[in-house]
Image: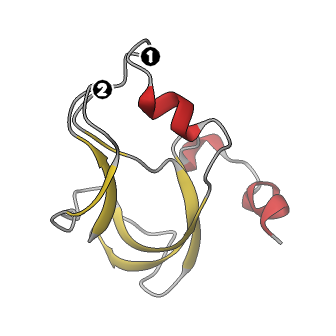
Amino acid sequence: MKAWYKETLQTPLRCVERPDPACLPGAVVVDVRAVHVPAYLMAMVDSTDIPLPVPLVLGAGGVGVVREKADDVFNVEVGDVVALDSLVESGDIDYPEDVLMGLG
């Protein structure tokens, strides 16, 4: 997979080829179709003042298609279009349509 990757705080952000992630229990693997690129991204990754956990593959939000799912995942199917947000877990959501409201 292609990924934006930062090896150390001193190295530049680079687009590199990385291994595809494994599908772990309770998880899905998503083919990302679109991502959110915040205005502050370059200031964040170019700074050595922000303690980023490196090495780091960037990507906290986006939209994609489920390629693979673990056996213990029941509320999503391969081929489903999903929203990605590193701050939201499925157990936090009472009404999924509320999360998707801003993506239309």
Of residues 3 and 30, which is closer to you in this image? 3
Q: Nearer the viewer, residue 23 or 56?
A: 56
**Residue that sits furthest to the top in the current view:** 49
Q: Closer to the camera, 91 or 63?
A: 63
Quarter of the image holding residue 1? bottom left
**Position of residue 84 in the picture relative to residue 19 (left or right):** right
Query: Left or right: 55 with respect to 91?
Result: left
Q: Is residue 93 above or below residue 65?
A: above
Q: Looking at the image, is 92 positioned above or below residue 71?
A: above
| Residue ID at (56%, 39%) | 41
Where is residue 46? Give x, y as percent: 43, 30
Element assignment for label 2: loop
Residue at screen point 36% across, 24% down = 52
Q: Amino acid at mark 2?
A: Pro
- According to the picture, the residue beneath numbered tag 1 turns out to be 50
Q: Which mark is residue 53?
A: 2
